[in-house]
Image (tube, rainbow, N blue to C red):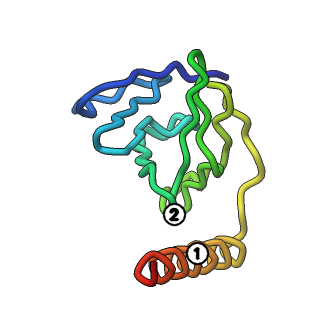
Amino acid sequence: MTLSHKFVEYIPEVIEDGILYITVEYRTAVHNCVCGCGNKVVTPITPTDWQLTFNGKNVTLYPSIGNWNFKCKSHYWITNNKIKHVSKWSDWKIDLGRNKDSEKKKKYFKEKRNT
């Protein structure tokens, strides 16, 4: 499965399946969950959230997309516009990942304050 991408100024109200909408100005990418559940996936592009790479043709989001708050709990990578589904995480692993993300953010902002 692949996603096409569109660079937009504003994220549209209606999100079409199969399209990753990217607003550079607002540092955000949005798409519908690729499992088909219909949930809107919002990925902030920041030093502590997701990184977006555009090579002139394709886009990559890093790290993976883990939709832990959705009933589907889908988990996948978007690499060069291609979707690669990976295993769902257990509740324990989700909590561990959230704690790791929280610590990473605290460290980043603490270091930023001290520079």
First in sequence: mark 1 vs mark 2: 2
Along the viewing direction, whichever of 107 and 62 lies nearer the viewer: 107
Taking the image as shown, residue 53 lies to the left or right of residue 20, namely right
The image shows residue 68 at horizontal and vertical percentages of: 55, 61
Q: Quadrant of residue 77?
A: top right
Give the quarter of the figure containing the N terminus. top right
The amino acid marked with disc number 2 is Thr
In the displayed structure image, the side of residue 70 where residue 63 appears, left or right:
right
Give the answer, above or below, for where 49 lies relative to 108: above
Residue located 52% across and 34% down the image: 36
Whether 1 is drawn above or below 93: the answer is: above
Disc 1 and disc 2: Cα gap in Å? 7 Å
At label 1, the amino acid type is Lys
Residue at screen point 22% across, 33% down: 13
Residue 89 falls left or right of residue 46: right
In this figure, what is the number of numbered marks? 2
| Image quarter (top left, top right, bottom left or bottom right) of the C terminus | bottom left
Q: Please give the label number shown on residue 48.
A: 2
> Which secondary structure, mark 1?
helix
Image marks 1 and 2: residues in contact by CB distance under 8 Å: yes
Q: Position of residue 44 (x, y in %)?
A: 42, 51
Q: Which residue is mark 1?
A: 104
Residue furthest to the right in view is: 87
The percent coordinates of residue 98 (x first, y second) are 58, 74
